[in-house]
Image (spheres, rainbow, N blue to C red):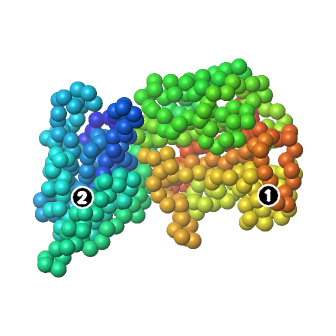
Amino acid sequence: MQTPAMQTPAMQTEYAQRRAKLMASIGKGSAVFRSAPMAVMHNDVEYNFRQDSDFFYLTGFNEAEAVAVFAPHHEEHQFILFVQPKDLEKETWAGYRVGVEAAKEQYGADIVYPIAELDEKLPQYLEKADRIYYRLGRDRPFNEKILTHWQKLLATYQRKGFAPTALEDPAPILHPMRQIKSATEIELMRKAAAIAVDAHNRAREFACPGRYEYEVQAEIEHTFGLAGALVAYPSIVASGVNSCVLHYTENNRQMQENDLLLIDAGASYEYYNSDITRTFPISGKFTPEQKTIYEIVLEAQLQSIAQVQPGNPYKQTHDVAVRVIVEGLMGLGLLQGDIEEIIKEEKYKPFYMHKTGHWLGLDVHDAGVYQHGETPHNLEPGQILTVEPGIYISPYIQPVEGQPEVDPRWHGIGIRIEDDVLVTSTGGEVLTSGVPKSVADLER
């Protein structure tokens, strides 16, 4: 279990501010958030617990089998928690619990109940709401529980004249809040970035022909652990042709002379994540073909990062990267035709099949929309996104109709370069700039 630091008064204040903002937005509604379930593997062996990000964002509470209710219209209790009670026997096996009494003091709830009392106590916080805010998720039994309570309350509408008459997803309210990071969140993400920077730099020093990908992975994750962090996602350590597999995680190949090594690895520090990718020659020198492709990807990334400006459409980072990549591949004869047609019809996708980034925060692919229908989402200060263009020339690449066959000398070159970028009032601040990426810095 990743256990965030004990809530300081400053953090308690921040969680309270988030709850107040949510409750101001839901008005006469009631919102229900469920903790992440405790995952079980086989024969009662448990995975590490990871709290639901929305639940954690609002409460800071890091245990399973918990429910948070927000009822701004209730006369006595606006923030209600249901948690597991203290149980010495169970805690001996599975770890300490905060318990009902301490949860009220430590987490600022107006009242805390044992989770076993949820069905009995929940209706009083829903009955006078005009709607219930709850996100139907993968926990089907709990979905059914909320739907059952809602149906029972709806049945009383004719007699009482009030009941929640709608079920609404809270994400359109909560997730824009999560997109804009507070000063505290930004500092946690700087820490997560700094840890990952150290790990990537250690990996580049350690990697050499003859070693195995998993040895490099071990060095990266050892560095995370020494700094009190966990892996943000399964580490990708992809040498040679493996660099052309976007989510390669086997990490079991022995590295060879003249291989490229693509490392995509990020740290999770107190639930906040970093996400860095670097690609470098493990023998110390790029081959001419590797260097040519690398320079195209680097130029695409630098121009894309330059688009991280408040007010710019989010998708502009991708559009710019695509154009640089297409121009570069056309210059090498790997694409041919009219550039506008190639871009419009996405004929570049055999080489570049993913988007140029994503939101970053409590989740690696963090909460928030990328566009509103046909209307672009514009960047705002406080948002953090990744910028990660790439080119992948698999030996099994299948060009689209009308495009040339790929000369085998390009086969097996996979390159991605990724940084985490904070939108500021004046532009973009690269939080992960401590990992070198120029050709001069990578060659030795």
- Res 385 visible: yes
- The answer to whether the residue labelled 2 contacts the one labelled 1, judged by CB atoms less than 8 Å apart, is no
The residue pinned by badge 2 equals 70
Q: Quadrant of residue 41?
A: top left
* Lateral position of residue 228 relative to residue 105, left or right: right
* Lateral position of residue 292 relative to residue 382, left or right: right
The residue pinned by badge 1 equals 400
Q: Amino acid at mark 2?
A: Phe
Q: Amino acid at mark 1?
A: Val
Mark 1 neighbour class, 10 Å CA radius: few under 14, some 14 to 19, many 20 or more? some
Where is residue 67 drawn, in percent x and y?
25, 50
- Residue at x 50%, y 32% (from the top left corner): 195
- Residue at x 35%, y 52% (from the top left corner): 139
| Residue found farthest to the top | 210
- Residue at x 16%, y 42% (from the top left corner): 100
Q: Nearer the viewer, mark 2 or mark 1?
A: 1
- Res 441 visible: no
Against 36, residue 242 (above or below) is: above
Which disc is residue 131 wearing? none
- Give 84 or 261, whichever is nearer the viewer: 84
- Give 299 or 261, whichever is nearer the viewer: 261
